[in-house]
């Protein structure tokens, strides 16, 4: 099991980033036409013994995915 993250979506719980990408986010992105993905507002933080990055992900498409 991928320990990176856990996300819940409706009745299914994704148990890690790989599971979330493969079984939830990935299929939805494949349905979108003209998909453009970007990172904005990126902030790097360095402090005593810790470092992290925050930012926003933006998606732009020509339409919305069709739900099955």
Image: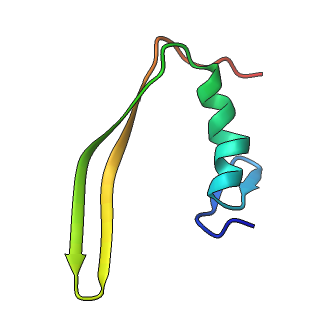
- Specify the quadrant that holds the C terminus: top right
Colour mode of the rendering:
rainbow
Can the viewer see residue 32? yes
| Number of numbered discs on residues | 0
Place of residue 19 in the rendered image (x, y in percent of width and height, measured from the top left): 71, 52
Q: Is residue 41 left or right of residue 61?
A: left
* Residue that appears at 29% across and 87% down: 49
Camera-side residue: 10 or 36? 36
Q: Hey, which residue is sitting farthest bottom in the picture?
A: 48
In the figure, is residue 58 to the left or right of 12? Answer: left
Please tell me which residue is depicted at 63% across the width and 63% down the height of the picture: 6
Find residue 8 and report its horizontal and vertical position in percent: 66, 55
Task: Tell me the quadrant of the picture where the N terminus can be found.
Answer: bottom right
Query: Image height check: is 45 above or below 48?
Result: above
Does 3 sit above or below residue 17? Answer: below
- 24 to 64, vertically: above or below: below
Q: In the picture, residue 4 is in which quadrant?
A: bottom right
Residue 8 in sight: no
Q: Position of residue 20 (x, y in %)?
A: 66, 50
* Rendered image quadrant of residue 33: top right
């Amino acid at each position: 099991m991928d320990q990176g993250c856990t996300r819940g979506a409706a009745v299914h719980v994704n148990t890690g980033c790989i599971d979330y990408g493969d079984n939830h986010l990935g299929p939805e992105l494949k349905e979108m036409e003209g998909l453009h993905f970007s990172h904005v507002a990126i902030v790097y933080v360095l402090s005593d013994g810790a470092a992290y990055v925050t930012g926003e992900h933006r998606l732009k498409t020509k339409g919305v995915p069709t739900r099955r």
